Image (cartoon, coloured by chain):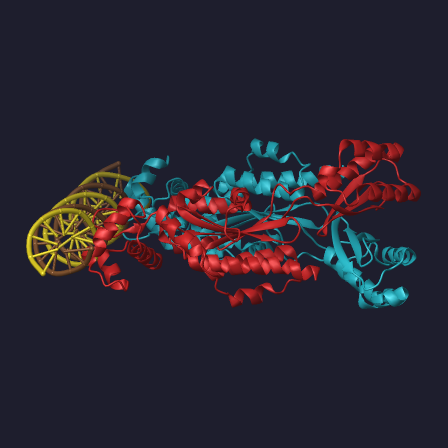
Chain colours: A cyan, B red, C brown, D yellow
DNA sequence: GTTAGCACTCACTCGATTGGAGTGCTAATA
DNA sequence: TATTAGCACTCCAATCGAGTGAGTGCTAAC
């Protein structure tokens, strides 16, 4: 069967109406709702076709129709082409970029949640292929050496290293020079065993100490495996009865608390080959997270400069206002992308 | 009216039974449940008294009785005296102290949640009256100076300071010495404007730079105002129908996500004058958090050495197994307290 | 002081009933 | 041939009433 323009219009009308009301929509409603000037009977025939084609379904006999996952999918795809609306409020709120990163991202999550009335998540950008920029050892006291490692992008990490016997100033200076000359500008893949062995040899009796420092370096520049996730508006799910049922809500809340569940989402979202604008929509069963099979999820990736990418996600009911959500995400994404551009100047 | 021993026994029986079942308990149940050998009629008379005294109440005529907040309170107070049971499992799980602080605390929250089936929160220890231990300035490149400040308890903070023109090695050395000799061992209250002025004078043309560094120092040793809160088991609230109702759940989940709401809890919990073992129980309306007025909250403070204190909290229904919860909290508290003792050796 | 007994209350369950929304099908119409 | 009016049918959701049972309060007897 063909999905002609009339069927498409009817499908859209069904979805739009369902998005608003959350109730199954009947033929008579559509007959009045659209400007097609068709009787409810005709609509019924068309609906019967649409059901057969799998775009809509009946919760039970003699109920109206609701969109199926496939129906939502069609709707979303056809909508993706359109342009995003501008959301001025967001712009204003995001501009105070002097805030520290995590404050900023928390705020993004919150603004997004308040703005859309859905649950949201934002991940801190993940660094990949980062390089050593600067290493500094300092003696805090007789037994403690502080190692500070700075990576590109000004990611700084400290490690306190305990030593059995004091290291004198001269040796400290030498070790500092050795570390910086050997490691600066290297990415994690470039620090191999041969290099480490060579450094240890040069450090002589302080070889094992060098090992500790290199561990700290690795810790700093390696790709973070437990990524930071900020969430907001989890309680918004109670606004949608279909999600607020006990079993559903429990699973959702759990996912929001155990952030590593959300991480699954990020992993798949990150790969944005074949997406429009890096925005991805998961409808119902398409979701990589089992407990969200009754939800829809929209994710967007943002770029914070060279290899630093994060993800923003919105989780809501399947009858999500996709148009608004995608628009809002586009705006935020643009803002975040721009933030870095500004920073470089 | 007097609360004699028999009434007390009956009240305890009512509460215990209600904790188990979550259903109002009737006179006949108590008559069989206790070893008092009293008929249901007698129990009824006593219950009538207890109700009049405000320890129990009837959800509706011809229903059994449930404990009132006042009843719970009496029960909890009388129980506080008893000794905590040991919870072996917890001990084992907490022992891996090499984990970093936040991992440890996250784990504590989780273990606690799984163990008790309630929602839990743990705050990172807050530092008060902390002192400067070590300061180090290093030149990363021509325009950037890295300031590392170490406070007692090995709290380390880094700040990147941008400078307009390069600072040469000699000056760097001098500034380092100036900073360390002037500030080491000082608490935040001791760093006053006179001292800062004096240091700025000594630093000559680098006075404003010193200002930046001092800001960083202050940032490090000041009492953290937005404290870190780890939560777990929020979805446990769905296990208790009286909390799972939509409005209730929504508010609770919100509190769990907006951690600063939980912070209110910490503020009041922190003041443990007049508590036994620093453990505090809020029942129903006693809670400092409005959205938790249908819950009970049990908090305990732990000490991580010199002025570093944190809070552990358990949030559950009013029919909470107080005995177990208090016992478990005591155990965890002891473990955490001991962790620091071990560290000092 | 304790208990047996009884009338009474009230929530809850269950089945029957009803109303209404919505469908599918058929036959008439343009 | 496509559209529509009409009608029988289905099923959900809400309502109602009777029945049930747990539990109480009160009274009178022990």
A256 in relation to B144, above or below: below
- Residue B125: image location, x then y, percent: 62, 50
Image position of B318 (left or right of A213): left
Front position in the image: A282 or D23: D23
Answer yes or no: is residue B164 visible: yes
x 65%, y 53%: residue: B305
Name the residue nearer the viewer: C24 or B242.
Answer: B242
Count of labels in the image: 0
Residues A141 and B100: in front is: A141
In the rendered view, does A116 fall on the left or right side of A311? Answer: left
Q: Quadrant of residue A25?
A: top left
Give the camera-side residue of B169 and B334. B334
- On the image, the x and y values in percent for residue A212 come to 78, 62
Residue B28 percent coordinates (x, y): 22, 59
Q: Quadrant of the C terminus of chain A?
A: top right
Q: Is residue A38 visible?
A: no
List x then y, in percent, for residue A94: 62, 36
- Give the left or right position of residue A241, taking residue B34 as reference: right
Q: Residue at x 38, y 50 (%)?
A: B74
């Amino acid at each position: 069967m063909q999905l002609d323009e009339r069927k498409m219009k009817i499908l859209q009308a069904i979805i739009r109406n369902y998005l608003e009301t959350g109730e199954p929509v009947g033929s008579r409603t559509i007959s009045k709702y659209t400007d097609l000037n068709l009787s409810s009977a005709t609509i019924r025939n068309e609906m019967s076709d649409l059901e057969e084609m799998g775009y809509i379904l009946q919760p039970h006999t003699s109920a109206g129709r609701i969109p199926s996952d496939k129906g939502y999918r069609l709707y979303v795809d056809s909508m993706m082409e359109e342009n995003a609306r501008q959301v001025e409020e967001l712009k204003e709120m995001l501009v105070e970029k002097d805030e520290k990163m995590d404050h900023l991202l928390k705020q993004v999550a919150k603004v997004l949640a308040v703005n859309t009335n859905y649950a949201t998540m934002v991940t801190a950008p993940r660094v990949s292929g980062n390089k050593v920029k600067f290493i500094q050892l300092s003696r805090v006291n007789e037994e403690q050496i502080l190692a500070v490692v700075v990576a590109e992008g000004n990611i700084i990490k400290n490690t306190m290293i305990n030593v059995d016997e004091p290291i004198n100033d001269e040796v400290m200076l030498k070790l500092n020079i050795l570390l910086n000359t050997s490691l600066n500008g290297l990415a994690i893949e470039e620090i191999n065993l041969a290099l480490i062995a060579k450094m240890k040899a040069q450090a002589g009796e302080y070889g094992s100490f060098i090992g500790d420092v290199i561990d700290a370096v690795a810790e700093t520049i390696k790709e973070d495996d437990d990524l930071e996730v900020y969430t907001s508006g989890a309680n918004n799910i109670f606004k949608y009865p279909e999600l607020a049922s006990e079993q559903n809500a429990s699973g959702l809340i759990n996912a929001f608390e155990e952030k590593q569940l959300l991480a699954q989402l990020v992993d798949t979202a990150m790969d944005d080959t074949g997406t429009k604008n890096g925005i991805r929509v998961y409808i119902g069963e398409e979701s990589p997270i089992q407990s969200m099979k009754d939800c829809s999820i929209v994710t967007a990736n943002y770029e914070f400069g060279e290899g630093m990418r994060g993800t923003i996600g919105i989780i809501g009911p399947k009858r999500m206002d996709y148009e608004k959500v995608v628009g809002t995400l586009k705006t935020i994404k643009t803002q975040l992308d721009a933030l870095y551009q500004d920073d470089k100047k």
